[in-house]
Amino acid sequence: MLDMLADAPVLHRGWRKWIASNLMNGVDPAKLVDRMVASGLDPEESREAIDLALSSPAIEAGTEIVRGMRKQRALQRALAQMQIQNGATQEVPRVEDPELFYRDYLWANRPVIVPGLMSDWPALNKWTPDFFVEQFGNEIIEVTADRESDKFFEDNFVRHRRAMTMRDYVQAIESGGASNDLYLVAKNGLLTNPAFASLRDDFTTPAGYLDTNCTAYDNARLWFGPGGTVTPLHHDGSNIFFGQVRGRKEIKLIAPCFLDYMYNDRTCFSQVDLLDIDFERFPLMREVAIQTAIVAPGDFILLPVGWWHWVRALEPSISLTFHNFHFTGGPVVWHHNT
């Protein structure tokens, strides 16, 4: 008899969590009792546990929260279906009018390419690898290194930080060919280094598109690397104006309404590798509408808040990113710390 009691299932914390989750998701309580009894639990004890959960204010509040989340997800999926119907291979449009840029794209949360905003920038012709060696060869810079050894190199940015001279960096990326192993990214903060202050004389803030009165020292951030660098699929929490100064980059974009399709396993990153999508692991990606843009020197592209994007350098590349748009009530930020 004691052995039988020892083998009897116990209504432990795991069962109570299972009950709460199912009740908040609208599962019929009678079906929960049937499942518990089929697993060997006492029928009366099972009904009492469910009745107790049903009387809990926490379960009532959770049910309301889940109902709202399911409604939001249903709306997202409806919008995603509209994106799919609109065509999965649609090209990113181009515009050259600031008014249309804000009205039809930034406020509408749509990506767009804006050409010609760098026509008067010295950087467009001046910024070459040789220039960086000649002007800053002995300066110590920070880069990210050994990226190819770590699947989560973006998450583990701190452990990939390396210090080296600009001369050594340029030699490494020129001799190494196409690679994602070594890259000077925005987080490395080159433009916040006083030794590189003169670089700010080589570009201006595009009037009409960005707030030229912005005095924040880091309102522009620089990326410099070889062909083959990849920024994995992710979304940002704010609008980004991405300017291509040297080389070309391929950018793939996915609308925010595909959030439930994106296998978003950590903060702002997706598990999906857009270079080689594993449709067996990620079947929902078969339905996702992906836009592709090639940005060339002189092009800006709007990466709207919440849009998923993946970036690959097709050639040795230098880029600048800005975020100081004209906002009446301050920058629009998606707080996504989940």
Image: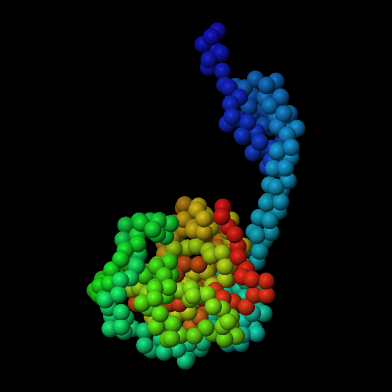
Q: Residue lying furthest top in this view?
A: 1
Determine whether 246 is above or below 23 in the image.
below
Of residues 160 and 141, the one nearer the viewer is 141
Q: Can residue 214 be seen in this view?
A: yes
Q: Residue lying furthest bottom in this view?
A: 120
Give x and y (percent) for residue 122.
Answer: 41, 89
Tell me which colouring the rendered structure shows: rainbow
Give x and y (percent) for residue 204.
Answer: 49, 85
Q: Can residue 115 be seen in this view?
A: no
The image quadrant of residue 171 is bottom left
Of residues 129 and 104, the one nearer the viewer is 129
Determine whether 225 is above or below 118 in the image.
above
Give x and y (percent) for residue 33.
Answer: 68, 28
Residue drawn at the location 43% of the way across and 86% of the way down? 201
Tag count in the figure? 0
Residue drawn at the location 40% of the way across and 59% of the way down? 157
The image quadrant of residue 50 is top right
Residue drawn at the location 62% of the way across and 22% of the way down? 41
Tell me the quarter of the image containing the N terminus: top right
Determine whether 313 is above or below 149 in the image.
below
The answer to whether residue 214 is left or right of residue 249 is right
Determine whether 65 is above or below 88 in the image.
above
Residue drawn at the location 56% of the way across and 83% of the way down? 212
The image quadrant of residue 94 is bottom right
Give x and y (percent) for residue 217.
Answer: 49, 75
